[in-house]
């Protein structure tokens, strides 16, 4: 029988890759979108005729109960969130409502409508924050450093709580940073690749960034959505770190990105205090051993490939050869 999946956050980076992957697996896809005065479907424009769009909002529990009743999914992937760390410092309450309490709203909707639905929660390496162990694994204690990280930690624990209290098949993927040509323009990787392309094409003269020494375990989003799916195919729900096992600095990202277009990053990058955060996460590096052993999952795209892919895609995008990534 055809499996039915509901994806919240389908208009986001991960939602678009997960929808592609699940369609390839033969799923029927319901994409949860919120009302907007402009169209937000750019990342999924190429899939729109193969997806059923359903209107609901993580802030509105009744809308989610209605969606579950009407479309009867077998699996729910909760990717929706206020996901940008700096915005979480500016809008901490909204971030808590969406990114933290939104998870309870959807879990409770599942409990009420059909507890047999399998649930994926998009947890985050931001929960490790000021890391107390290197590398970070499933058992590493959490120490979030932003309202976003705190909200994700709530979402993580409420998922575990509903699993233990109501026997839901609810799993969390503790995903480390993952990027792609479809990454939002405000995140550092895409900000770099997009502006490198603009500089190469003569559309910009400099690139203003914050902390160049921050280190992240960066992978490719297209690889990571496969781990989400694999978690829901297991007999038992669980939590998994999903990462490459390597870490690189923002500076290294710049070096490779400018190298891809034959330029020296030192000539264009300007450090600007405006992009520093009230509290920083200095170093993230995940240990993906559990995901590798239990799910058979492994990151397939190297850091170098990722950076160069993003720069090339932005060059194409700015020259009108590629759509759907802004
Ligand atoms: P993203 O591109 O920012 O997408 C976020 C999605 O959430 C968008 O579709 C957005 O819809 C939707 N959304 C926001 N508020 C909503 C609300 N109130 N009701 C319904 N939908 C709402 O994020 P992403 O990079 O794809 O990440 C997917 C998930 O993984 C997020 O939960 C993120 O926090 C988490 N995560 C991401 C990473 C990473 O490195 N990418 C790592 C760990 C965890 P609109 O298009 O309408 O704004
Ligand atoms: O790209 P970022 O904004 O991502 P961040 O804060 O690591 O969060 C992302 O990854 C999390 C997983 O760990 C997700 F849960 C979350 O939703 C999001 O997807 O910043 C990365 C690093 C930071 O240390 C930041 O201080 O880059 C540094 N940075 C330096 N200059 C900058 C800039 N970040 C941004 N956004 N813009 C800059 O100009």
Image (spheres, rainbow, N blue to C red):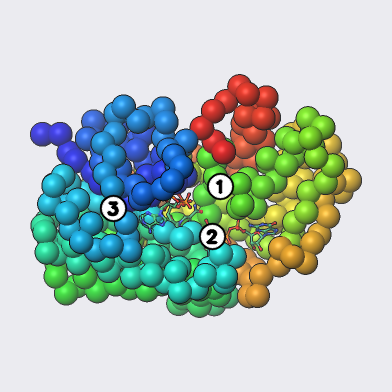
Question: What residue is rendered at 29% in x and 34% in y?
Answer: 51
Q: Taking the image as drawn, is residue 68 in sight? A: yes
Q: Position of residue 99 (x, y in %)?
A: 40, 65
Disc 2 C-beta below 8 A from ligand 2: yes
For discs 3 and 1, the disc positioned in front in the rendered view:
3
Q: Which mark is residue 120?
A: none
Q: Position of residue 182 (x, y in %)?
A: 53, 40
Residue most extreme to the top: 321
Q: Earlier in the sequence, mark 3 or mark 2?
A: 3
Q: Which mark is residue 184?
A: 1
Q: Disc 1 on helix, strand or loop?
A: loop
Q: Position of residue 23 (x, y in %)?
A: 29, 32
Query: Residue under circle 2?
Result: 84
Query: Residue under circle 3?
Result: 56
In the displayed structure, would residue 76 be above or below residue 92?
above
Disc 3 C-beta below 8 A from ligand 1: yes
Question: What residue is rendered at 15% in x and 34% in y?
Answer: 2
Distance (Cα) linking label 3 and label 2: 21 Å
Disc 1 C-beta below 8 A from ligand 1: yes
Badge 2 vs badge 1, beta-carbon distance below 8 Å: yes
The image quadrant that residue 281 belongs to is: bottom right
Q: Disc 3 on helix, strand or loop?
A: loop
Question: What residue is rendered at 67% in x and 24% in y?
Answer: 319
In the displayed structure, would residue 178 be above or below residue 314?
below
In the displayed structure, would residue 206 be above or below residue 281?
above
Residue most extreme to the front: 37
Q: Earlier in the sequence, mark 2 or mark 1?
A: 2
Q: Quadrant of ligand 2?
A: bottom right
Distance (Cα) linking label 3 and label 1: 22 Å
For discs 3 and 2, the disc positioned in front in the rendered view:
3
Q: Disc 2 on helix, strand or loop?
A: loop
Question: What residue is rendered at 42% in x and 31% in y?
Answer: 45
């Amino acid at each position: 029988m055809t499996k039915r999946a509901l994806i919240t956050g389908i208009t986001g980076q991960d939602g678009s890759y997960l929808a592609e992957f699940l369609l390839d697996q033969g799923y029927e896809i319901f994409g949860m979108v919120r009302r907007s005065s402009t169209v937000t479907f750019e990342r999924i424009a190429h899939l729109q005729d193969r997806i059923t769009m359903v209107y609901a909002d993580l802030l509105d529990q009744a809308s989610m109960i209605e969606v579950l009743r009407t479309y009867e999914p077998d699996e729910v992937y909760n990717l929706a969130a206020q996901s940008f760390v700096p915005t979480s410092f500016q809008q901490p309450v909204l971030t808590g409502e969406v990114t933290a309490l939104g998870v309870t709203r959807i879990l409770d909707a599942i409990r009420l409508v059909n507890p047999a639905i399998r649930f994926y929660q998009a947890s985050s390496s931001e929960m490790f924050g000021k890391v107390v162990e290197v590398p970070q694994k499933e058992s590493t204690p959490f120490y979030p450093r932003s309202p976003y990280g705190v909200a994700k930690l709530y979402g993580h624990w409420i998922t575990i709580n509903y699993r233990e209290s109501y026997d839901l098949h609810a799993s969390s993927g503790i995903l480390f940073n993952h990027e792609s040509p479809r990454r939002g323009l405000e995140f550092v990787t895409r900000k770099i690749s997009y502006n490198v392309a603009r500089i190469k094409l003569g559309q910009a003269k400099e690139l203003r960034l914050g902390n160049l020494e921050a280190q992240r375990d960066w992978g490719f989003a297209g690889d990571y959505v496969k781990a989400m799916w694999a978690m829901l195919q297991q007999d038992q729900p669980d939590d998994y770190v999903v990462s490459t096992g390597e870490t690189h600095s923002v500076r290294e990202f710049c070096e490779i990105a400018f190298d891809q277009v034959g330029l020296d990053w030192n000539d264009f990058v300007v450090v600007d205090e405006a992009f520093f955060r009230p509290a920083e996460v200095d170093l993230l590096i995940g240990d993906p051993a559990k995901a590798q052993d239990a799910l058979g999952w492994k990151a397939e795209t190297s850091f170098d490939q990722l950076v160069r892919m993003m720069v090339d895609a932005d060059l194409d995008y700015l020259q009108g050869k590629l759509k759907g990534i802004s």
